[in-house]
Image (spheres, helix red, strand yellow):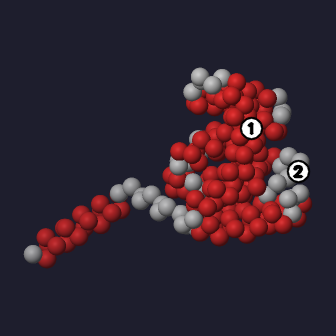
Amino acid sequence: MIAMRSIVLACAMLAMATAPARPAEPCADIERARQSTYVPFAKLIVDDVNAIRKSTPNASFNAALQTLSGTYARSASSGDMLALRKLIGLGLFTAYAAHTAPPDTTFKLVCELARRSPEPALTLDPLTCAVVAIDGARRDDQGNRVLAKQMLDLAKARMASDPNGPAAHALFDGILPIIAACSAE
């Protein structure tokens, strides 16, 4: 009987050791962090979306978004920072509306924008990169949790020169505990 228990216990321990890691639990208040960082980018495209829908009323909403995406991508590839922000805003808008994590392309673009530090250097950019890094299944990746922490440091460093002044401080203070908790190991 003891030998049987030992075998069962050994099999259970082996199963636990070889089982895939459990995905990270959903972050508390991630929706508040998403709203605080994704919506400012999404607001950049509202007028463009409305203009396209008015000019082509029979086109589907998705077709209008595809048209905007192509327009923004062409301009961004020529160095237009506003177009880059709008392209990021489009990706964040669609993810926020669908209650999903942003696409990998948006993740890459927003983090590159945060690292590049275009003038003016905004606190919003690294905070958004940090939130995208821990949004959904990305949080399961240790490298993304480390990136989120690095982006917090970058955002903190930018607060002093951010032209949004107190609003940048309020954004950072509101997002800091969420990102810190969600990027904890």
For the residues labelled 2 and 1, the Cα–Cα distance comes to 23 Å
Instruction: Give the camera-side residue of 32 and 150.
Output: 32
**Labelled pair 2, 1 in contact (Cβ < 8 Å):** no
Label 1 crowd bin: few (<14), some (14–19), many (20+), radius 10 Å: few
Q: Position of residue 134 (x, y in %)?
A: 59, 56
Total labels: the figure holds: 2
In front: 131, or 19? 131
Asked if residue 126 can be seen in this view, the reply is yes
Residue 27: percent from the left, percent from the top?
A: 53, 63
Q: Write the residue at 30% across / 66% down.
A: 13
Q: Residue furthest left?
A: 1
Q: Classify the position of the N terminus by image quarter.
A: bottom left
Q: Which image quarter holds the C terminus?
A: bottom right
* SS assignment at label 1: helix
Identify the residue at image location x=57%, y=27%.
Answer: 60
Quadrant of the image occupied by residue 47? top right
At which x and y percent is residue 177? 65, 70
The residue lying toward the viewer, choosing from 60 and 12, is 60
Q: Earlier in the sequence, mark 2 or mark 1?
A: 1
Three-letter code for the amino acid on which mark 2 is drawn:
Pro
With respect to residue 108, does 150 lie above or below?
Answer: below
The type of residue carrying mark 1 is Asp
Residue pictured at 67% horizontal, 51% vertical:
38
Q: Residue 47 carries which label?
A: 1
Q: Name the residue under label 2.
A: 120
Does any portion of residue 88 appear in the rendered image? no
Q: In this view, does 64 lie to the left or right of 166?
A: left
